[in-house]
Amino acid sequence: MTEIATNTPVRIDSPSKRIAKQFIEDPVAVVGLILFGLVALIAIAAPWLAPQNPYDLAQLNIMDSSLPPGETSFDTEMTYWLGTDQQGRDMLSAIMYGLRISLLVATVSLALAITIGTIVGVFAAFFGGRLDSIIMRIVDLQLSFPAILIALILLALLGRGVDKVIMALVIVQWAYYARTVRSSAMVERSKDYIDAARCLGLPSRRIMFRHLLPNCVPPLIVVATVQIAQAIALEATLSFLGVGVPITEPSLGLLIANGYDYLLSGNYWISVFPGIALVVTIIAINLVGDRLRDVLNPRLQK
Amino acid sequence: MKMRALTLPIVAGLAAAGISPATAQELAIGLKSEATSMDPQFHQLSTNIQVAKNIFEALTTQDAVQKVTPGLAESWEAIDDTTWRFNLREGVTFHDGSEFTARDVIYSFCRIPLVQNSPSPFTIYSAGIADMTAEDDHTLTITTKATNPLLPTELWSLAIVSADTLGAEEEITYGPDGTCEGMGEVPQAPAFNSPDVAVGTGPYKLETYTRGSEVVLSRFDEYWGGTPDWERVVMRPITSDGPRVAALLAGDVDMIESPPIQDLPRIEDAGLKVVDALSNRVIYLHMQQLEDAPGISGTDGENPLLDPRVREAISLSINRDAIVERIMGGYAVAAGELLPPPMFGTSERPVDPYDPERAKELLAEAGYPDGFSITLGTPNDRYINDEQVAQAVAQMLAQIGIDTRVDASTASQFFSRRNDLEFPIYMAGWGASSGDMSSPLKSLVATYDPDTGMGPTNAGRYSNPEMDALLLEAMSTIDDTKRDRMLQEAETMVLNDYGIIPLHYEQTVWAMKPNLSYEPRVDQYTMATKVEPASE
């Protein structure tokens, strides 16, 4: 670095380029990113990749139930590389489809929760006063209950179903984003550029969404990466407890729950493989999230 | 059908008359579910009954194969069609020392309609009793409202409590449906959680009842039937299958009920004993036979289940042997009737064959060549592997073109939703407590009528007036041969109509330490009184 001549014009990278550059400096995070990419690819392409549609009951045959990994179906040529569950469902296909459901639930609920949380947070910070107090007390109240408890109560009332799980996750998660956005917006609000915008007579809506919000994004990204991993885990937990997705369309959590009864009797594959898939997914996201947090943290900037 | 499953294996229960002091002191049993009350007249639920049967007795008893034998009544006779005389056992005392007399029996029967908030009351047995009079302390006459040949069988369900302990007056006069006189202040179910109130004549006394944790019983030394085998009995609810098996393997409990079928090889490998019996419980599919059934689509608003051909197709599409073999691990028997033969009123009707091709033809004939969509309701914690069985049924229905969604919920939720007719088709089970065909016919397929109490569990609303008439006639026929034939005929009518579809009979399994023996019971009860130290 000492070679750099003082008169060389300094190239200032755009923020996203800088972030990308710093991100790849950590090989562990890159591995995480690649793993996550793979998982996402499998999830998206599951209907074309999977040897069987595990949700089409007509394709299953109970005579193939509980086969260990590597066995062949009793009537077709199909080989079950990861074994089958009690219903004769190919575990490999079930995991692919399960990932699909898990990621779908997590990303959709994340998007909805961020939208709601951000709007609420910006409003609270920008207008302050009584509105702020009311919103933040609601947030406090919600955050003081464990997420799993709230989700369980909601699902007990709503019933099973992918849409209902998404709804429950949104309700559980919006408060995190609202609080994050509010605290960074509070800091930004008192800065000069906001005053400048006010002096220009810009409408509040424009100041909020065009000036204030973009500067609140970095902490939001960090919270989102942590939360998406939590959303996946929460969905798996709910399904494991039997209140999540319908039993004929298992997600990873439900697959693990199905196999749980058989763990002690030696049919390990029903639980273990979906468990590995779940762990890999969550670790990959967390690795990416950790690195992003470091990269986006202004205090750790060189 | 497997022969092993048909025979009722009986473990030699030749316990030595004396107690071997080394082992026979304390018995710990791991139960699958917990009793909701210690009041034997509160809730008609096998979980409660099996605990209460250790503390309380009834006028009659039923042995492991549901044969009626004398209990607190030594003998009985039918004087005419509606009058019975019972000779009560003498020298029987309650746990608190008071003597058992006919007054206690009258009090017990009087109390049944006075028990409040019962989720499933015992009044279905007591309501038919018109009058009771004590000729002397140990002779009792019971008059029934209608002819009831099953009275001695039903009496087993009516536990005898102590009139003195519960605060009755000296003179009790029977009146039907809660109009008895001289009852005093009748204690309600919660009072029975105390050993001072839960006083019976049974071989064990209640020591403590800790909700959510355990029921502790201790030996009643003055028991009329001889000294019980165990000094202390602990009954512990361990609702999760895995931990219950683990508790047995670790030696925390001596015996468990309903070990999961997939764990049996492991239990046997550990040197423990497994016994099983064919139960009187049939698992069945019931189909809603009303014009506007919910949860069906692809039929232009019509209910295809009204067509007997569709119902037959459903039955033919089910591979019962595959369910028994693959899901029940062989611990079940494919069912062709509502009660396993050779029990009373069965006709040995063959099991419906697995014929998906014929099923598709039938669907096409009925006007549904492309099938339709339907929701199958099932509990997920009530019957052995219930959720798995329902999914397998859904799979088989899908293969003939009936696209089936499984709606599984916990038992309490399932039963209330089922009673609200929320499911177009549902899976449930029925255990015939009386051990005869009138029980499933009366409850499951007789035309629903809350006034007469017929068809209380007929949430498919199947209705066949001809069958109803025949059933009513059978229920008031004293002659066993005639009644048997009538019940067979009534059952055949229903099954020819495919009004209900039997799937399989459950087999009940118990696992225990090798030094114990238990005669497996048809009624699925786990009773400490019947656990004996095995003779070496």
Image (cartoon, grey):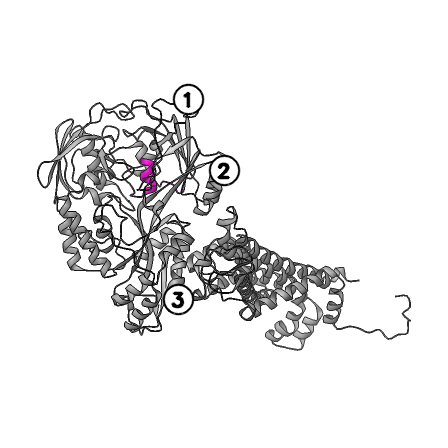
Q: Is residue A219 visible?
A: no
Kindly identify the amino acid type of the residue bearing the numbered disc 1.
Answer: Pro
| Point 22% across, 22% down: residue | B91
Q: Position of residue A268 (x, y in %)?
A: 54, 51
Chain of the residue that carries numbered disc 1 in the rendered image: B
Q: Is residue B363 left or right of residue B242?
A: left
Determine whether B325 is above or below A292 in the image. Answer: above
Q: Which marked residue is nearer to the observer: mark 3 or mark 1? A: 3
Q: Which residue is mark 2?
A: B270
Q: Point out the tag, 3 or 1, that comes first from the N-terminus.
A: 1
Q: Position of residue B11 (x, y in %)?
A: 36, 35
Q: Are marks 3 and 1 on the same chain?
A: yes
Per the model, the C-alpha gap separating discs 2 and 3 is 41 Å
| Point 91% across, 71% down: residue | A6
Magenta segment main secondary structure? loop
Q: Position of residue B175 (x, y in %)?
A: 14, 39
Q: Which residue is mark 3?
A: B399
What residue span does the magenta drawing correspond to? B32-52
Would you call the spot at circle 2 few (<14 residues within 10 Å), some (14-19), or many (20 or more)? Answer: few
Q: Which residue is mark 1?
A: B21
| Point 26% across, 48% down: residue | B341
Determine whether A84 is above or below B209 in the image. Answer: below
Would you call the spot at circle 3 few (<14 residues within 10 Å), some (14-19), or many (20 or more)? Answer: many
Q: Are marks 1 and 2 on the same chain?
A: yes
Name the quarter where the C terminus of chain A is drawn.
bottom right
